[in-house]
Image: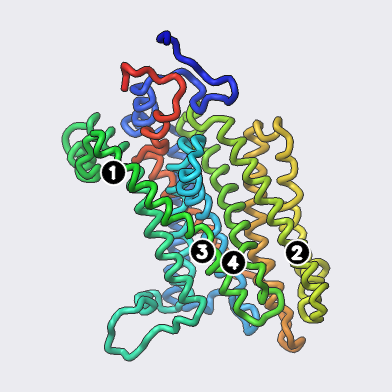
Amino acid sequence: MSGKEVVSILRNPLVTEERTYKQVSDDVITTLETPPSKMWWISFITALCVLIMGIGVVTYQVRTGIGTWGLNKTIGWSWDITNFVFWVGIGHAGTLISAILLLFRQKWRTSINRAAEAMTIFAVMCAGVYPVIHMGRPWLAYWVFPYPNTREIWLNFRSPLLWDVFAISTYFSVSAIFWYIGLIPDLANIRDRSTGLRRKIFSLVSLGWTGSHRTWHRYEVLCLILAGLATPLVVSVHTIVSMDFATAVIPGWHATIFPPYFVAGAVFSGFAMVLTLLIITRKVMNFENYITINHIEAICKILLTTGMLVGLAYSTEFFIAWYSGNEYERFVFINRAIGPYAWAYWIMVTCNVIIPQILWSKKIRQNLVIVFIVSIFVNIGMWFERFVIITTSLHRDFLPSSWAMFSPTWVEVATFVGSFGLFFTLFFLFIRFLPAIAISEVKSVMNFARKKNH
């Protein structure tokens, strides 16, 4: 064979510019060694200000009580659980990209998995804020964990709310471990380029990585084991979240379709947020050669597929409500479509079913501005989906005497906005201090890598 590099003509390269292994390390790690750009500072300070505002509002409501929320007798869950389920759903794409695509050997995941994994961790942290506040006494949050105590209080393991605690904590733990294990080779790379205190810190967190054949073998086996553990979580976590509703007797909630419906919706909203973050990261960190149009297009195809699954779930709900002959179930869905909250229902349908259909066009999938706008609309639509499921099922229940309308207070709105501040503050800190691209994995899929620079 000649020494000439052979490149497949059947698929586009995952790294768009000819780079050596050393240049890949330089491109990613230099962003951590040089002062941050002006755009990063603007983005980070904006997110930090929103976070500080959110901290102030949460402090106020903890000191005052959750009566500061728009709670009433029939719609007590409307805002906080909507936001809780929204953030849990956002976290699903990270595990899907990291674990399932790894098991299926999908090489296009390599440039985007690190940011998606970080997104999962930060989204679950944002989700965890709401149950803790909703307790009313956050300083007693540890009571939900089953440990020996002298209070003679034990947990009700039949409660779906307790299932949430175990599902979310397990999901967070496995996702964090998977994310950290994947970081180790790149942390060692940074260690070898550093001096002084910085070198000592990265020597500690890289866990003595040597890069030997034995080390790589153990690393790859461990990643596959963790991927195997994380994959069922994609299904189980949001399935358990759906049980909060499916095990109730309220019309509009008591449905066996909820577990697969919630999982499809979670993947849908999660990939929409991945698109939003990757397009921002691509611009802010100058990663155009690594987060390519091909990556964006692949995510768009998944977004289109899951969007159609969500649309099928919407139509199935209406069909089953009609086919069941249950007058209460029929009323809930008719009320969603033409009742007082019809505007929220049609925003949901427009954002989640109609707008994603433009992604059938290859030209649109390769237009970053349009894709970014579509990802924002999908996130808006998925928030409204949770709002519609919860609010329209509660505001008109079995008894007309308990019918009511819900509107959030300024405290609830500010808390939700503050959760975005927490999410984006953590994300911008992540891309500033840790490699947002999985350097070692990108090198493994390059077409143009020269062996002499291994």
Kindly identify which residue carries mark 2: 316
- Give residue 435's mark: none
Q: Is residue 411 visible?
A: no
Please rate how many residues cluster around mark 2, counting C-alpha atoms within 10 Å: few if below 14, some from 14 to 19, many from 20.
few
Secondary structure beneath disc 4?
A: helix
Image x and y of residue 137, in percent: 41, 78
- Nearer to us: label 2 or label 4: 2
Q: Residues under labels 2 and 1: Cα distance?
A: 46 Å
Q: Earlier in the sequence, mark 4 or mark 1?
A: 4
Q: Label 1 crowding class (10 Å Cα cut-off): few <14, some 14-19, many 20+?
A: few
Quarter of the view holding residue 157: bottom left
Q: Earlier in the sequence, mark 3 or mark 4?
A: 4
Q: Identify residue type, mark 4.
A: Thr
Q: Residue at x 53, y 79 (%)?
A: 67
Residue at which label 3 appears: 236
Q: Which residue is mark 1?
A: 218
Q: Is residue 194 above or below residue 434?
A: above
> If you read the primary sequence from the N terminus, does the residue marked by circle 2 or circle 4 appear first?
4
- Contact, mark 4 vs mark 1 (Cβ under 8 Å): no
Q: Secondary structure at mark 3?
A: helix
Question: Which of 389/235 is in front?
Answer: 235
Q: Amino acid at mark 3?
A: Ser
